[in-house]
Image (cartoon, grey):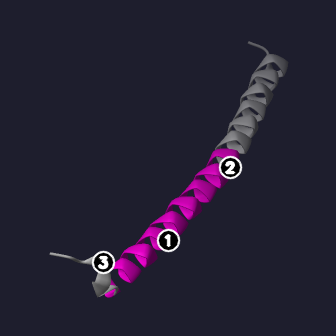
Amino acid sequence: MTDSEKLDLLLEKVTSIEKDMIDVKADLRRLHRDDAFIIDEVERVHTILDKHKDDKSVHTA
Protein backbone atom coordinates (compact mmCIF):
# COMPACT_ATOMS: atom_id res chain seq x y z
CA MET A 1 0.00 0.00 0.00
CA THR A 2 1.46 3.34 -0.99
CA ASP A 3 1.70 6.33 1.29
CA SER A 4 -0.91 8.09 -0.81
CA GLU A 5 -3.33 5.17 -0.43
CA LYS A 6 -2.71 5.10 3.32
CA LEU A 7 -3.43 8.81 3.57
CA ASP A 8 -6.61 8.40 1.54
CA LEU A 9 -7.74 5.59 3.82
CA LEU A 10 -7.01 7.68 6.93
CA LEU A 11 -8.90 10.63 5.45
CA GLU A 12 -11.88 8.36 4.76
CA LYS A 13 -11.84 7.11 8.36
CA VAL A 14 -11.56 10.61 9.83
CA THR A 15 -14.40 11.86 7.62
CA SER A 16 -16.53 8.90 8.68
CA ILE A 17 -15.81 9.55 12.35
CA GLU A 18 -16.72 13.23 11.93
CA LYS A 19 -20.07 12.25 10.37
CA ASP A 20 -20.69 9.77 13.20
CA MET A 21 -19.96 12.46 15.78
CA ILE A 22 -22.49 14.79 14.14
CA ASP A 23 -25.09 12.01 14.39
CA VAL A 24 -24.22 11.33 18.04
CA LYS A 25 -24.54 15.04 18.89
CA ALA A 26 -27.95 15.17 17.20
CA ASP A 27 -29.07 12.07 19.12
CA LEU A 28 -27.92 13.59 22.41
CA ARG A 29 -29.83 16.81 21.71
CA ARG A 30 -32.98 14.77 20.96
CA LEU A 31 -32.48 12.73 24.11
CA HIS A 32 -32.06 15.86 26.19
CA ARG A 33 -35.33 17.29 24.79
CA ASP A 34 -37.11 14.00 25.53
CA ASP A 35 -35.73 13.94 29.08
CA ALA A 36 -36.87 17.52 29.68
CA PHE A 37 -40.34 16.63 28.39
CA ILE A 38 -40.59 13.59 30.68
CA ILE A 39 -39.42 15.55 33.72
CA ASP A 40 -41.93 18.33 32.96
CA GLU A 41 -44.71 15.76 32.67
CA VAL A 42 -43.74 14.05 35.96
CA GLU A 43 -43.76 17.43 37.71
CA ARG A 44 -47.18 18.24 36.21
CA VAL A 45 -48.68 14.94 37.38
CA HIS A 46 -47.05 15.32 40.80
CA THR A 47 -48.69 18.75 41.18
CA ILE A 48 -52.08 17.29 40.23
CA LEU A 49 -51.67 14.48 42.75
CA ASP A 50 -50.66 16.93 45.49
CA LYS A 51 -53.77 19.03 44.82
CA HIS A 52 -55.92 15.91 44.88
CA LYS A 53 -54.32 14.75 48.12
CA ASP A 54 -54.96 18.14 49.75
CA ASP A 55 -58.63 18.24 48.66
CA LYS A 56 -60.33 16.10 51.32
CA SER A 57 -63.76 16.58 49.72
CA VAL A 58 -62.89 14.13 46.94
CA HIS A 59 -62.16 11.32 49.41
CA THR A 60 -65.34 9.50 50.36
CA ALA A 61 -63.91 6.40 52.03
Front residue of 2/40: it is 40
Front residue of 29/46: it is 46
Q: Distance between the residues labelled 3 and 1?
A: 19 Å
Quick one: label 3 or label 1, which is nearer the N terminus?
Answer: 1
Location of residue 52 in the rendering, given as x and y in whole percent from the top left corner: 36, 78
Label 3 secondary element: helix
Q: Is residue 47 magenta?
A: yes
At label 3, counting other C-alpha atoms closer than 10 Å, the crowd grade (few under 14, some 14-19, many 20 or more) is few
Q: Is residue 19 magenta?
A: no
Which disc number belongs to residue 58?
A: 3
Q: Which of marks 2 and 3 is in front?
A: 3
Q: Residue at x 44, y 78 (%)?
A: 47
Q: Give the range drawn in magenta.
A: 26-54
- Furthest-top residue in view? 1
Q: Which residue is drawn at 43% across and 74% down?
A: 48
Which disc number belongs to residue 44?
A: 1
Location of residue 29 in the rendering, given as x and y in whole percent from the top left corner: 66, 54
Q: In which quarter of the image is residue 16?
A: top right
Q: Is 42 placed left or right of 49 in the picture?
A: right
SS assignment for the magenta stretch, majority: helix
At label 2, counting other C-alpha atoms closer than 10 Å, the crowd grade (few under 14, some 14-19, many 20 or more) is few
